[in-house]
Image (cartoon, rainbow, N blue to C red):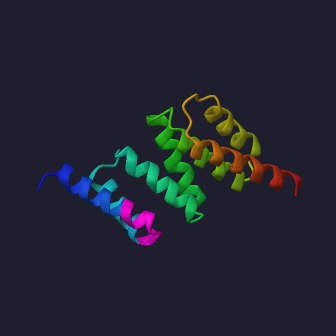
Amino acid sequence: MSKNMTVEKTFASAIQNHQKNNFKAAEDLYNQILEIDPNHIKTIFFLGTLSVQTKNFDRAKQMLQKTIQAQPNNVDAYNNLGVVFKEFEEFQKAKDCLNQVETEKDLTVEQRNKIEILKDRMKEKEDG
């Protein structure tokens, strides 16, 4: 079996576990992929997203910044990184992430909703 086939199957399994909120299994699978291919950008992004969900914000920041370096137009990575900066109470950096994504013309409804939710949460945190 080729390395790519192994990575593809492992990635599919990781995504399935992630979608079912089996975070530990998904994380283990993402880490296995990165051992084989440390630059597998989809894995880096999803591991960053999972890290936000599990409140491992240091790792999330690292993974999401790496994603943005490779994919500077990745709206979801900017949005998730904005969440990380909000948690660190680095509000200007969070706003910079939001400003980066708000200029995108082809945002989905879901992406726009995530941006609005993050803006609301930041406002609550700043006001609170």
Q: Is residue 20 magenta?
A: yes
Q: Which quadrant of the figure has residue 108?
A: top right
In the depicted structure, whether residue 31 falls above or below residue 74: below
Q: Is residue 80 left or right of residue 36?
A: right
Residue placed at 51% from the left, 32% from the top?
73
Q: Is residue 59 magenta?
A: no
Q: Residue furthest left?
A: 1
Q: Position of residue 13 (x, y in %)?
A: 31, 63
Residues drawn in magenta: 15-24
Q: Position of residue 7 (x, y in %)?
A: 25, 54
Q: Residue furthest right?
A: 127
Quadrant of the image for the N terminus?
bottom left
Q: Is residue 7 left or right of residue 59?
A: left
Residue placed at 65% from the left, 51% from the top?
83
Residue placed at 34% from the left, 54% from the top?
34
Q: Residue furthest front?
A: 109
Q: How many marks on residues?
A: 0
Residue placed at 35% from the left, 44% from the top?
39
Q: Position of residue 63 (x, y in %)?
A: 49, 49
Quadrant of the image for the C terminus?
bottom right
Q: Is residue 20 left or right of residue 80?
A: left
Q: Main secondary structure of the magenta part?
A: helix
